Image (cartoon, rainbow, N blue to C red):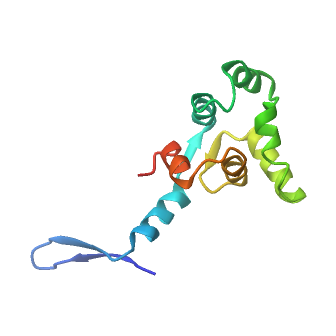
Amino acid sequence: MGTVRTIVDVKTGQTTVIDDRTPEEILEGKRRVATITFADLLRGLVQTNKITVAEAKTWVRTGTLPAAVDATTDALPLEDQIQADRELRYGANFPRNSIAIAAMQTAFNFTDEQVDNFFGIS
């Protein structure tokens, strides 16, 4: 596993950063900290035609999940279904690695790259 080190020359004060992580390690690090807001989630689902604008508005106003989103958690183990449902109904922010995001990625056949783009990870 690679590391990031900062070296400071005590004589000159010059700082050098040495990053020997692999591209995969860098990407995984970005995925661990990436989040989107509930509004961004809704916008992305509408833009990818997974839900309609009307469904998004209903979700905001009543907390009722669109059928397509609600169905994404059905294949999860019961404990994960409960966690994902809680995230989807009450979450203000969604981590890239959340159960709800993983369930939607699988159900909607999004690639890792598509989800990364959704989260602004490049």
Residue at 81% x, 52% y is 83
What residue occupies the far left of the structure in this picture?
Answer: 12
In the image, residue 12 sits, relative to residue 74, either above or below, namely below
The answer to whether residue 112 is seen in the rendering is yes
Position of residue 31 in the picture relative to residue 50 (left or right): left
In the image, residue 118 sits, relative to residue 80, either above or below, namely above
What residue occupies the far top of the structure in this picture?
Answer: 54
Is residue 6 or residue 89 the one in the foreground?
A: 89
Is residue 72 or residue 85 the one in the foreground?
A: 72
Position of residue 77 in the picture relative to residue 58 (left or right): right
Residue at 75% x, 27% y is 59
Percent across and percent down for residue 97 are 63, 57
Position of residue 105 in the picture relative to residue 10 (left or right): right
Percent across and percent down for residue 44 are 58, 34
Residue at 78% x, 49% y is 84
What residue occupies the far front of the structure in this picture?
Answer: 109
Query: How many numbered tags mark residues here?
Result: 0
The answer to whether residue 89 is seen in the rendering is no
Residue at 42% x, 66% y is 26
Position of residue 20 in the picture relative to residue 1 (left or right): left
Percent across and percent down for residue 61 are 76, 21
Percent across and percent down for residue 5 are 32, 76
